């Protein structure tokens, strides 16, 4: 039946085409007779030529002003990965492909066939290959093995993928500019900027010297502007030359700007204490220039207070200040009296994806809420820096620190080993937003 219908349609089309041919021949003969035998034949011929030239010129101008859009796919050729009402998941993918025309197109087509929607993409050029990095969106039921298999079948090698989150949706240039701005304002932001730029990685500062920055697969060795070497390691995926260049640019920015700490000062009013009324203190960031005042604070503290803070011989307390006040290793808050004396120091020290919090309050200023307020501010700093958890190393007898961490209202983990208590506070996204 279908074959009969097609024959009928072909017969009709052939009849129309044949009629058009006869009509064209008749019109051509009529025009020829008018041009050859008519009185105005040459004039008509010249006018027709001018009309054709004007039409061609107008058509060329129109095509220049309104270029044709590329033909779109036929309906049904492409299926969207985002189905209304279906739960979606974000993934980060890295794959090495040949540096040849069509490699990226084949990879994108393989992802679209799953279907997986490519949200953003960046390329890391190598000598003869390219590392393509994608942030993609897929259905929640799409397994990682399916995505990996599709990439491999499209020619990708050394495939790596992990779950992504909303932070990965920020395009790379914007993210780098934000990190550079934070680094320019605060020297303590450099390790955080490197960690946020490269994801899960370990950053160590070693007292060594190297002649040139070095990239060796999963390890970068970079000259630290403040002295020593910054060693950045990441298990997977290996660093690319593009990432190495970004790290060197951030460190060069830090070196050009030199030592710096934001000059932020907040007035803090404390409740009356034993034998004293209301007190006003200034809370600000501390830096290495505060070492003499910090040593004087140690001298006014009792042996028990210093032991609770440093968990060791009190005679060594002053030796720790060089590390604690250096912005490269974290951020320190100082509580200062109107006379310029430091009565408390609170430290937030970077430790990979987490940070250690520690507080020292002079004996005469204890039991007035100063330590709790400083810990709360340290948690705010950690949340602003994108730190997911903070921990405190103390003892079970330090009821003040334990109570302070409990008042944060976040999940806590307790670990006891050889008389030392480690309390870890998990800062959720909701908690960070509340702190701000």
Image (tube, helix red, strand yellow):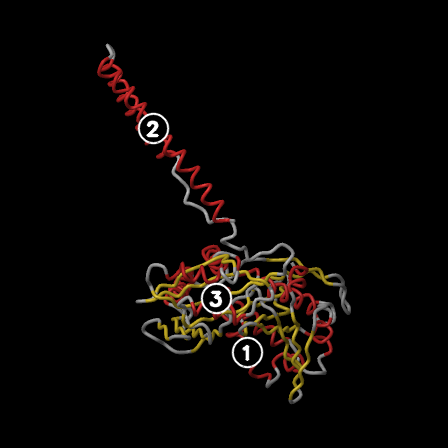
The residue closer to the viewer here, 29 or 35, is 29
Q: Please give the count of numbered marks on the rendered protein.
A: 3
Question: Circle 3 is placed at which residue position?
Answer: 93
Q: Quadrant of residue 330?
A: bottom right
CA–CA distance between discs 2 and 1?
108 Å
Near mark 1 (Cα within 10 A), the count class, few <14, some 14-19 or many ≥20, is some
Report x, y in % for residue 113: 49, 61
Element at badge 3?
Answer: strand
Query: Does the CB distance between marks 3 and 1 fall below 8 Å?
Result: no
Left/right of residue 185 with respect to residue 306 in the rendered view? left
The residue closer to the viewer here, 359 or 246, is 246
Q: Quadrant of residue 67?
A: top left
Vertical order, 338 against 236 (above or below): above
Report x, y in % for residue 414: 68, 80
CA–CA distance between discs 3 and 2?
63 Å
Report x, y in % for residue 9: 46, 41
Of the two numbered discs 3 and 1 on the same chain, state the one appearing first in sequence: 3
| Residue found at the very far bottom of the displayed protein | 418
Mark 3 or 2: in front is 2
Mark 2 or 1: in front is 2
Q: Which mark is residue 22?
A: 2
Of the two numbered discs 3 and 2 on the same chain, state the one appearing first in sequence: 2
CA–CA distance between discs 3 and 1?
48 Å
Question: Circle 1 is placed at which residue position?
Answer: 318
Q: Quadrant of residue 55?
A: top left
Q: Which mark is residue 300?
A: none
Of the two numbered discs 2 and 1 on the same chain, state the one appearing first in sequence: 2
Element at badge 2?
Answer: helix
């Amino acid at each position: 039946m279908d074959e009969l219908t097609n024959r009928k349609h072909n017969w009709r089309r052939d009849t129309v085409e044949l009629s058009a041919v006869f009509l064209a021949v008749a019109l051509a003969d009529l025009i020829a007779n008018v041009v050859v035998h008519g009185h105005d034949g040459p004039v008509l011929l010249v006018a027709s030529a001018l009309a054709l030239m004007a039409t061609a010129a107008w058509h060329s101008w129109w095509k220049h002003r309104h270029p044709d859009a590329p033909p779109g796919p036929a309906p049904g050729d492409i299926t969207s990965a985002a189905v209304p009402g279906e739960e979606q998941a974000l993934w980060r993918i890295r794959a090495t492909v040949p540096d040849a025309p069509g490699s990226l197109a084949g990879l994108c087509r393989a992802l679209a066939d799953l279907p997986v929607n490519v949200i953003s993409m960046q390329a890391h050029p190598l000598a003869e290959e390219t590392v393509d990095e994608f942030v993609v969106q897929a259905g929640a039921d799409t397994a990682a093995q399916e995505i990996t298999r599709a990439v491999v079948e499209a020619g990708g090698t050394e495939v790596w993928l992990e779950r992504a989150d909303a932070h990965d949706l920020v395009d790379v240039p914007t993210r780098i500019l934000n990190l550079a701005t934070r680094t320019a304002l605060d020297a303590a932001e450099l390790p955080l900027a490197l960690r946020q730029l490269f994801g899960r990685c370990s950053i160590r500062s070693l007292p060594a010297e190297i002649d040139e920055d070095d990239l060796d697969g999963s390890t970068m060795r970079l000259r630290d502007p403040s002295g020593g070497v910054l060693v950045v390691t990441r298990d997977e995926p290996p660093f690319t030359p593009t990432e190495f260049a970004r790290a060197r640019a951030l460190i060069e920015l830090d070196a050009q700007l030199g030592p710096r700490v934001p000059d932020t000062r907040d007035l803090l009013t404390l409740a009356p204490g034993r034998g004293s009324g209301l007190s006003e203190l200034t809370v600000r960031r501390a830096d290495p220039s505060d070492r003499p005042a910090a040593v004087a604070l140690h001298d006014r503290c009792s042996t028990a207070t210093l032991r609770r803070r440093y968990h060791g011989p009190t005679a060594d307390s002053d030796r720790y200040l060089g590390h604690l006040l250096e912005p490269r290793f974290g951020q320190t808050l100082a509580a200062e009296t109107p006379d310029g004396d430091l009565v408390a120091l609170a430290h937030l020290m970077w430790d990979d994806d987490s940070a250690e919090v520690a507080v020292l309050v002079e004996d005469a200023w204890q039991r007035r809420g100063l330590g709790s307020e400083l810990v709360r501010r340290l948690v705010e700093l950690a949340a602003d820096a994108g730190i997911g958890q903070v921990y405190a190393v103390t003892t079970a007898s330090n009821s003040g620190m334990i109570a302070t961490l409990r008042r944060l209202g976040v999940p806590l983990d307790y670990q006891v080993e050889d008389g030392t208590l480690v309390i870890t506070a998990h800062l959720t996204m909701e908690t960070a937003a509340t702190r701000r």
